[in-house]
Image (spheres, rainbow, N blue to C red):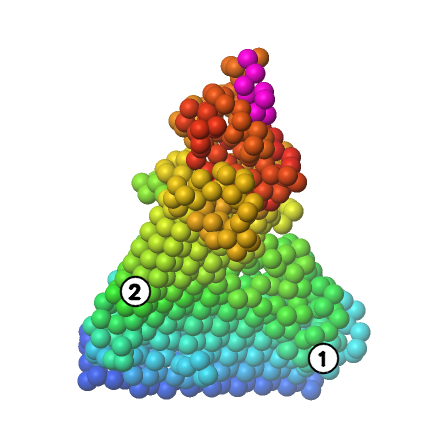
């Protein structure tokens, strides 16, 4: 491993090279504010290259390339007080005429800022070599921004992002066998940092306008030969909008829309040849490290969230995207998970679409979209050697108001799996990731441990992605909440005919339809950590429920759904008349069931193999504890037998036997058809089912193993 003493020795090497390039768009000495007159156009393109070559067999080489760019303002990356490493020093650039320390506000903050800061460093030596490349590019920093109405501030584009790129390479002329003794050593360090808007996270710098930032940081280390031990790190750090206290202007962009966008990409990796020897770790340090961070919108802190406000006169479009890539050559040494899993090799990847924000929109058809992904390609990671942080929308409350709104929290890429399972790993749930793990997701809004919430208000709204520690409230309208995976999450439809589904894995999921004709579909388990045990509650109205695997609870313990599951008395009577029912055509039966509460995949059985019907304590005159200690299932014959007169029970039998048993003293019964594939949950207040009953829900699935554990009271 190259120690500090080793570095000092290399500074005295025969071959040394140091290049530095700077570019500043505007520098203001004494003004507290700057008025552009309406628009600002800046291009920031510093580029530096340093190459050191030693032909002496006894001397090494050292090269350092630095490239620093700043559009306008005061960046902490160039300030004396910046302290990223806790040592009180600024490891980057300090110079007069770069920052504008007195400038606090930019008026006329629209227009365009683009550019690339690029640093390339290379060494050639028969002995040890140190190669450093640092590239930083900051568009705007430490400024309040005030834009004119009907304008956009464009920082980079999707095709040509505002960027920082760093490449550190080395070529060794040593003998082919390095002997694994750390000599000669090629030390390679590449750092790329980019910010679209760099403001403090305390909300002290307000932004009025429509900022759209696309940024990218790329850092590579590149050993070009294999006959030296390798040590180094590649660090890529990209944040599009940092410190987002943002409010759009009255008419937004001027085209009927108001856009706030932060897209960030960070790539870290290895070019050239795969090293056959890493330098031996010392004092717990790493020999090789790959780090990347990409955050689209970093609005505030966990406890002091930033605010993003749309307006009522336009359609608001708010998007944050974070994408990280670990890019390494496709060679067997990596494909077999050897290099990136070695003890002395560390991988730290963070991708976040948006975080720590309170977002409100208005009366239009609004969209709030967070997307994040981590792509590792051929580099197979394991939990022991990697630190991964992935969330599309984290610790953010969203309220969209009126209009047909769309809210998306989508994980777009997961790491290539080893111990990671791309379907059910923890990361797969982090489309919407709450700020408090295990938070309260029920409708009890006064909880101190309340989960983050998405409320879509009035309109036919759509929510999609995956979620963990979140609550979704559809409000008024025909809403569609469609999640891939959900963990400790509640979906609440509100008033309207809502569709709420979880297509893959679930854990601690609660579906509540509210008022209306709702469709509710829970998730499945994975046979391991996640059990797919969902709580499904249709609410008022005629609903259709599916557990879709797992130990699910279907709730009929409160409201009108506890006793009434048909659209009208005619439908109820038809379901209870077996002769009339059997005379119907298939099409007619489908029509009747369309007016009936239904569970489409109920599975009977004990323990985790079976689902649960949760019934009303008050309507059944059975408490939860009474059922657990004394409750039994009984046939119609047993229910009318004096020997069972005082038993706590629910009747399970054929519909004919239930209707013929007379006064039973039991208010709930479950009829099961021939073959055990369909039936009905019935309620009658006085327990005399011969005089009629209420159909609570129609059941299809596997009812052949009904037992006490398939019933609960609450």
| Number of the label disc, if any, that sits on residue 403 | 2
Q: Is residue 282 above or below residue 704?
A: below
**Around disc 1, counting alpha carbons within 10 Å, would you say few (fewer than 14), some (14 to 19), or many (20 or more)?**
many
Left or right of 33 on screen, residue 293: right
Query: Residue drawn 38% across and 65% down?
Result: 406
| Number of the label disc, if any, that sits on residue 225 | 1
Q: Is residue 217 magenta?
A: no
Residue range of the region highlighted in magenta in the rendering: 632-642
Disc nearer the start of the sequence (1/2): 1
Quadrant (top left/top right/bottom left/bottom right) for the C terminus:
top left
Query: Residue drawn 69% across and 87% down?
Result: 55
| SS at circle 2 | loop
- Does residue 363 show up? yes
Q: Residue 136: x percent and y percent? A: 44, 76
Q: Nearer the viewer, residue 70 or 171?
A: 70
Q: Nearer the viewer, residue 604 or 81?
A: 604
Left or right of 350 on screen, residue 147: left
- 3D distance between C-alphas at marks 1 and 2: 60 Å
Q: Residue 691: x percent and y percent? A: 44, 28
Quadrant (top left/top right/bottom left/bottom right) for the N terminus:
bottom right
Q: Is residue 639 magenta?
A: yes
Quarter-of-image position of residue 357: bottom left
């Amino acid at each position: 491993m190259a120690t500090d003493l080793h570095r000092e020795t290399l500074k005295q090497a025969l071959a040394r090279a140091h290049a530095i390039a700077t570019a500043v768009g505007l520098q203001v000495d004494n003004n507290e504010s700057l008025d552009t007159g309406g628009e600002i156009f800046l291009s920031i393109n510093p580029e530096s290259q340093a190459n050191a070559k030693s032909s002496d067999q006894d001397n090494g080489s050292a090269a350092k390339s630095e490239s620093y760019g700043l559009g306008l303002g005061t960046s902490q990356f160039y300030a004396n007080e910046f302290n990223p490493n806790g040592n009180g020093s600024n490891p980057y650039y300090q110079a007069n005429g770069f920052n504008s320390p007195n400038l606090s506000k930019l008026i006329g903050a629209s227009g365009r800022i683009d550019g690339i800061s690029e640093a390339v460093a290379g060494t050639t030596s028969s002995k040890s070599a140190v190669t450093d490349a640092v590239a930083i590019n900051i568009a705007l920093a430490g400024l309040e921004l005030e834009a004119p109405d009907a304008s956009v501030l464009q920082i980079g584009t999707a095709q040509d992002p505002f960027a920082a790129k760093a490449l550190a390479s080395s070529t060794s002329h040593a003998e082919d066998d390095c002997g694994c003794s750390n000599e000669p050593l090629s030390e390679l360090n590449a750092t790329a940092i980019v910010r679209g808007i760099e403001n403090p996270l305390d909300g002290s710098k307000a932004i009025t306008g429509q900022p759209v930032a696309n940024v990218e940081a790329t850092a590579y280390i590149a050993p070009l030969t294999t006959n030296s031990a390798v040590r180094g790190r590649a660090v890529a750090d990209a944040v599009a909008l940092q410190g987002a206290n943002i409010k759009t202007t009255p008419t937004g962009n001027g085209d009927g829309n108001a856009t706030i966008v932060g897209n960030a990409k960070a790539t870290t990796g290895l070019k050239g040849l795969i090293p056959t020897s890493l330098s031996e770790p010392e004092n717990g340090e790493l020999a090789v490290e790959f780090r990347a961070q990409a955050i689209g919108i970093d609005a505030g802190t966990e406890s002091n969230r930033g605010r993003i406000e749309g307006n009522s006169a336009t359609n608001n479009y708010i998007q944050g995207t974070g994408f990280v890539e670990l890019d390494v050559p496709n060679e067997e040494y990596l494909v077999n998970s050897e290099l990136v899993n070695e003890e002395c090799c560390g991988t730290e990847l963070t991708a976040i679409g948006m975080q720590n924000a309170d977002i409100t929109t208005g009366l239009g058809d609004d969209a709030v979209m967070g997307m994040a992904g981590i792509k590792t390609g051929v580099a197979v990671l394991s939990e022991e050697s990697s630190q991964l942080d992935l969330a599309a929308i984290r610790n953010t409350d969203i309220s969209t108001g009126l209009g047909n709104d769309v809210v998306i929290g989508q994980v777009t890429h997961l790491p290539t799996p080893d111990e990671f399972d791309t379907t059910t790993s923890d990361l797969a749930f982090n489309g919407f990731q709450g700020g408090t793990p295990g938070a309260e997701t029920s409708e009890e809004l006064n909880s101190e441990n309340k989960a983050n919430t998405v409320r879509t208000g009035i309109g036919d709204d759509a929510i999609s992605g995956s979620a963990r520690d979140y609550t979704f409230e559809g409000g008024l309208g025909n809403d569609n909440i469609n999640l891939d995976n959900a963990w400790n999450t509640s979906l609440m439809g509100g008033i309207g005919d809502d569709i709420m589904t979880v297509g893959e894995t679930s854990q601690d999921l609660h579906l509540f339809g509210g008022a209306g004709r709702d469709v509710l579909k829970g998730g499945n388990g994975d046979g391991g950590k996640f059990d797919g045990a969902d709580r499904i509650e249709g609410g008022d109205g005629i609903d259709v429920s599916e557990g879709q695997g797992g130990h699910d609870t279907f709730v009929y313990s409160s409201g009108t759904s506890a006793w009434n599951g048909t659209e009208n008395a005619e439908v109820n009577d038809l379901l209870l008349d077996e002769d009339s029912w059997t005379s119907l055509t298939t099409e007619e039966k489908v029509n009747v069931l369309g007016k009936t509460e239904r569970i489409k995949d109920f599975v009977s059985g004990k323990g985790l193999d079976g689902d649960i019907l949760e019934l009303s304590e008050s309507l059944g005159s059975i408490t939860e504890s009474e059922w657990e200690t004394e409750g039994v299932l009984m046939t119609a014959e047993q229910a009318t037998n004096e020997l069972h007169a005082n038993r706590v029970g629910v009747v399970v039998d054929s519909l004919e036997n239930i209707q013929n048993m007379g006064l039973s003293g039991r208010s709930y019964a479950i009829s099961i058809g021939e073959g055990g594939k369909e039936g009905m949950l019935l309620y009658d207040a006085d327990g005399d089912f011969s005089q009629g009953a209420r159909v609570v829900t129609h059941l299809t699935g596997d009812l052949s193993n009904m037992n006490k554990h398939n019933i609960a009271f609450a």
